[in-house]
Structures are given as C-alpha cells and as structure tokens.
Amino acid sequence: MVDILPINNTIKITLVIVAIATAGGYYIIRSQKLPGVRSLVVSTTTSLYDTGVLDQIEDAFEAENPIDLYFISVGTGLAISHAKRGDADMILVHAPSREIAFMEEGYGVNRKIIAYNYFSIVGPVDDPAGIGDKTPTEALELLVEKGRAGEIIWVSRGDDSGTHTKERGLWSQVGFDTSALREEDWYREAGAGMGKTLQITEEYEAYTLTDMGTFLKYSKDGLVTLEILIGAGEELINIYSAIAVNPYSNPDANFEDAVTFTEYLASGEGQAIFENYGVDIYGSNLFNPAVELLLTGSDPTTATWIEATGFFEGSECPLEYRWGETKLYDR
Amino acid sequence: MVSAILEGLARVLGLIASGDRTLVEITLRSLAVSGLATILASCWSIPLGVAIGLGRFRGRSLLKGVFNVLLGVPTVTLGLVLYLAFSRSGPLGSFQLLYTPTAIIIGQSILITPIIVSFVTNSLEAVDPEIRSLALTLGASETRANLTVLGESLSGVFLAVTASFNRAIAELGVAMMLGGNIRGVTRVLTTTIALETNRGELALGVALTVVLMAIVGAVNILVGVAQRRL
C-alpha cells in the first residue's frame, strides 16, 4: 500500500492549523467591536487626518465618551460618496460648494465650521514665473501665460479631493475651465494625494496648490525644497467642516453620536487641540480654530472671508438643515 | 536615500526593542488576518485544485485558464468590487462587515484562491501518472489513490499555501478598501506603510517594509522546517 500521508502527520498538521486559527481568531475578535461601546464612522479628508491632529482628538474624545471613533482617511470627494452610500456616520471635509450640494441632496445635516487655514501656491525658490508679489488671481493669470509660453509647469492634484475642488474654483475665478486646461501640455494632473503631488512638483520644478499641513511636513523634513510664494488671503482660505449624515437618508447612521462628536469638535477643548496642534513640531499651528472667531467676530477680516466662502444663506448651516436637539448653533 | 532607510531602520529597531505597543499590535493583526485568510482559502482552494488537477471533465482546461487569468486581478479592483458588495447600500450590506477585520479576511481569501488553485493543479499534473495507476492496481480506492498523488505533490501544496500567505500579508488594495485603515481595528502593516508614506514619513515606511519582509521570511523558514519533518 503506497501511503505518503501517514495519519500522525495529518493530525500534526491539523493541530497546527487549529492552533493558528484559534490564536488568530481570538486576536481578531478582541479587536472587533466591544459590546456597550458605540462606534462612529467618520470619513475624513486626508489633509486633516494625515497631519495626525485627529489621532490626538480621538484620544481626548474617547477618554471622555463611550464612543469608538473610526476614522476613514480619504479625499473629500470619496468621503462624500462614502457617506452617500451609507458607509459613514459623518464627514470632515473642506469643499464648501460640495458640502451644500451634499445637504441639498438630503444626505447631510448639522454642518459646523470647525477650523480653517490657508491654501498656498508653492513653486521653485527662484520663482521663474515671478508670481511672488502678486495676488492669487494675478498669479494664476501669469502662470497660464508663462505655461503657454512653455516656461513653467503646473501640477494639479487631479483626484477630486477638496484641494482639487479649490483649485478648480480658483481657475474658474480667473476665467479658465480646468477641463480645457488639462488638455494643455503645461498643465499636468498627478491623480495623487498631496504628498505625492508635492514630490512630482519638486521633480518638475513646477507650481502647485497645496494645503498647509502637508506642505509644512514635507518642507520641514527636506522632502521638497519648494517655497510658499502666495500664502494667505481671502481667495486661498481653506475651511474645514463637520457634517452629520441625515438620519432620514440613512436610518442606520449613528446620528446621535455624530452630533456629540461635532459638539466636541466645536467645544473649547476640541478647538484648543486645533489651535495648538503642530506648534511644537513645526513652530506654528497647522489649523486655526473657527468657532470662537465666527461667534464673537474677534477677527472681522478673517470672519468675513470665511463667511464669503463657507456660508450659505448667511449661515454655516441654513435652518432647514438643522436637525434634532443640539447646542451647535447656540449664540 | 540610503541614510533615510538607515534612519528608518534605526527607528523601527528602537520601536521593536522598546516593545512599542502599536507596532506589536499592527504586526500581530497582520499575521492573524492574513493567516486566517490563508487557512480559510485553503479549505476550498486545495480541494478545488485537486479536482481540477486530477479530474477528467469537459471544460477542465478552460477552468484552469480562468484561474490563471484570475491570478492577475489587481488587488485594488477586488477591493473595490467587494467594497461595493459590503457597503451598507450594497447586496451584503446588512451583514455590517465593512471596516472590520473579518471583511479583510474574506477579501484576502478570495484574492489568494486562484494562487492556491493554480499551484496545486500544476503540481498535481507534474506527478507521474504511473503513481496513480500503481495505487489503483494495488487495490486503493479512487479517493485513496488521489490522496496518494496529493502526498507525492506535497511540496507543491506547501508552496501554494506559503505563496498565498505572502501575497495576502503583502497586499494593500483589499486591506485599504475593506478595512479602511482604522487605528486599533483594521490597521495592518501594509496600510500603515501607505499612511506613513502619505504623511511624509518615508523612512518609517521603508522600515515597516523590513518588518513585513522579516515576518514573511520567518514564516517561510518555519514552513520549510515543518515540511522537511514530514
């Protein structure tokens, strides 16, 4: 009788497999949801998550609340489509024009502006296009002119993110449509995250629009030598908001905890984390708290800028999109 | 470049030396998820491979070809398709599996099924057909004869299983799309590498890859030892 699989070997193999499966299974079950702890899935823009600020907020929030925060870090475009499909309970995003559409379509409620900073136009140190002393709109017009003359290259995110949405908006402000620009040789689409786009821009010695958090990180670590050429101003304001998923569009959504977390983000404690995050590492903060500013008008210029870009019908969240009992809009 | 990698290695060695909880947790999760995916996939893929390798039925070579083609499915495509299935508005949404380790295990087990099937099929076909005839002549039943052939090609089966484990633990698309890279829940080695790379922590990304390769190496050595003992 030919017998290559003796029975005691079969038992050995089985035992090893059972042991691995039990150990693995135990480990997995341990890290799955715990009973009694509610989970809140937050789809967030990468420019917020990748800086690490949300890790700090998560630790502080979970220490006080029996709620497990599940952050899914994707671009603003994908964050919104996650929420529409019912795969997120709330979103943290930075593209006001798409946020109002999200609410108008019935998917989102209780929008709250939580923080802001500025986008920057960055480029090579020697600034071949000479945009350094221009306003954002003048700079973009100049970049088109120099680009068409074959002197410079512009790199676009091209990934439907919040930063990409902002870039498209800026081009349309100076009368250009990105769907036409992308056909031109000097306008390149990276189709990648901010970090990758910055590295591509570096390689091409080109120009691009960047969020502040990612740029400071890459610049400080010497990954790029690009310089901020245009750094602030009304046109470049970058507004981060929280929006809960409308419980009527998705009855499974954890609306109650979404409101709790939004209230935390807008609270003094949450706002302080935004204000202080990154100071020790970068020498300046990456985000500015927005709640107090909008409430008291302590900085009227910036408040006006935020209102111009981030408000709808004179409010961060028009009345028809406010749901349930919430302290979010108390004055 | 080299200095960045060395710096990253130094950091990771420091983390390992200090028994960094996060690193240990992520590494164990990677092992558990991909190990379970491999065991799960083996349960159906080895019998399927045997059936295709030893069976004589119409459409057999077509089926073989299909599995060979499936070897080339991009992980991100599989991740996307399964995301749409597991999504709360998808057909399997009611199971609420999205963003759980279970979802990654299912996804990876589907990903590696063609690897095990193809490898097992090919190694069985490489066994001298005389051995099967001999077993039958000596009075073995059909099943017994098939087991004998399987025993002859045991090294091929081991290769199939280890290769599929290596593929599972090193893939990114499925773990990212189905797991969501949630800290403390579905964050595994490859999604951490992707995140740290996005964050500009390039050295850390490289260093974590070294950890990943060390695990793959260790598992392969263990399997090799086990195989020689049999």
Image: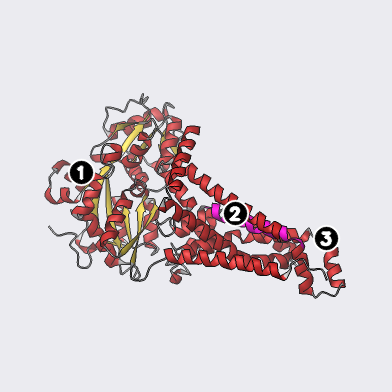
Q: Kindly state the secondary structure of the residue where label 1 is placed.
A: helix
Where residue A207 appears, as percent x and y from the top left, is 38, 33
Where residue A34 appears, as percent x and y from the top left, is 38, 68
Quarter of the image where the N terminus of chain A is located: bottom right
Q: Amino acid at mark 2?
A: Val
Q: Is residue B170 magenta?
A: yes
Q: Kindly state the secondary structure of the residue where label 3 is placed.
A: loop
Where residue A85 appears, as percent x and y from the top left, is 40, 63
- Vertical position of residue A106 compared to residue B215: above or below: below
- Which mark is on residue B219? 2
Question: Which of B161 and B217 lies nearest the eye of the viewer?
Answer: B217
The answer to whether residue A162 is left or right of residue A183 is left
Q: Earlier in the sequence, mark 2 or mark 3?
A: 3
Which region of the structure is painted magenta? B152-171
Can residue A94 be seen here? The reply is: no
Q: Residues within 10 Å of mark 1 (few under 14, many from 20)?
A: some
